Amino acid sequence: MRILITGGAGFLGSHLTDRFLSEGHEVTVLDNLITGRLENISQHYGNPRFQFIKHDVTTHIHIPYAIDAVLHFASPASPKDFPAIPIPILKVNSLGTHNALGLALTKQARFLLASTSEVYGDPLVHPQPESYWGNVNPIGIRGVYDESKRFAEAITMAYRRAHQLDTRIVRIFNTYGPRMRLDDGRVIPNFVGQALRAEPLTVYGDGSQTRSFCYVDDEIEGFQRLLMSDEPGPINIGNTTETTMLELAELVNRLTGNRAGILFKPLPIDDPKVRQPDISKARQSLDWEPTIELKEGLARTITWFRDQIEMG
């Protein structure tokens, strides 16, 4: 297949690029590098089946050759990005999704939207099934991401219904692993960075809020199965094992040998108190579920971050 990945120099996009190239497909990566890094894809330079195009997908996308699948993964996704670059986030998930869908329609390509568990907001239903409509604050700091992803799902379904476009929607839950930015602002890079600097780990609130962390290799396997299936989604891809922030902090400190302890700070506004996917649909439709436990995945991630710090 000829596959185009928007945001392909980012965390998830670059791992998808690795996966599809390893399977013999041709991959074109579009990325404006606002949060993506060329280091994530530089290992593919010189591969005749790989092409990188620096491009902002909020403007028209022109590709002169056939494309079989468009995977729209372009979007900053870190909480620290929400107040820093709110308008680019809104634009990439609205205009960018519109342009990516237009490309897929022109090429008669399959389309996969990277949506997010954030469409559920601060959920009142737990765990979260795909049928849950969510509890989102549209005017809060996080609204620029949450609501633009909800719009992205809506326009994807509109193209499916109005143009019979072959679409897929995946809702991604708390993924972690190598190639995350150390200054990402999400909890695992925050904790690992602090631990490797021998600093106390910052836990917000009393640390009882939960997340369900899925290692990147498991997540990519879910994406690949969804793309190659006949399942349109939306479908949750994530790990069902719930972990409190306090438990996570203690585990990171143990794995890194950090003795600086934990520092408690006030809980941020609209920070979801719980997050856990119901993956019944993924199990049934894709025969998928995660296999890598948090301790193992964290150990791999810590090793990668430590190497990055040592390399400067």
Image: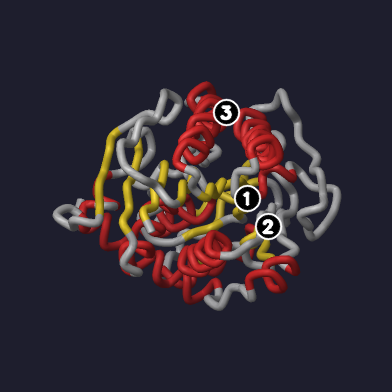
Amino acid bearing label 1:
Ile
Residue at image coords 45%, 65%? 259
Q: Earlier in the sequence, mark 3 or mark 2?
A: 3
How much space separates mark 1 and mark 3, taking CA atoms?
15 Å
Residue marked by disc 2: 235
Q: Quadrant of residue 63?
A: top left
Q: Which mark is drawn over residue 297?
A: none
- Observer able to see residue 27: yes
Q: Give the residue at the far right of this rendering.
A: 124
Q: Earlier in the sequence, mark 1 or mark 2?
A: 1
Residue 295 placement, left or right of 25: right
Residue marked by disc 1: 169
Residue at image coords 39%, 30%? 61
Amino acid bearing label 3:
Ser
**Closer to the camera in the image, 289 or 137:** 289
Residue 246 placement, left or right of 124: left
How much space separates mark 1 and mark 2, taking CA atoms?
6 Å
Residue at image coords 69%, 69%? 285
Residue marked by disc 3: 94
How much space separates mark 3 and mark 2, taking CA atoms?
20 Å
Mark 2 secondary-structure assignment: strand
Residue at image coords 38%, 59%? 1
Q: Earlier in the sequence, mark 1 or mark 3?
A: 3
Residue 33 placement, left or right of 259: left
Mark 3 secondary-structure assignment: helix
Q: Crowding at label 2, few (<14), some or many (≥20) Cα neighbours within 10 Å?
A: many
- Observer able to see residue 146: no
**Closer to the camera in the image, 104 or 277:** 104
Q: Crowding at label 1, few (<14), some or many (≥20) Cα neighbours within 10 Å?
A: many
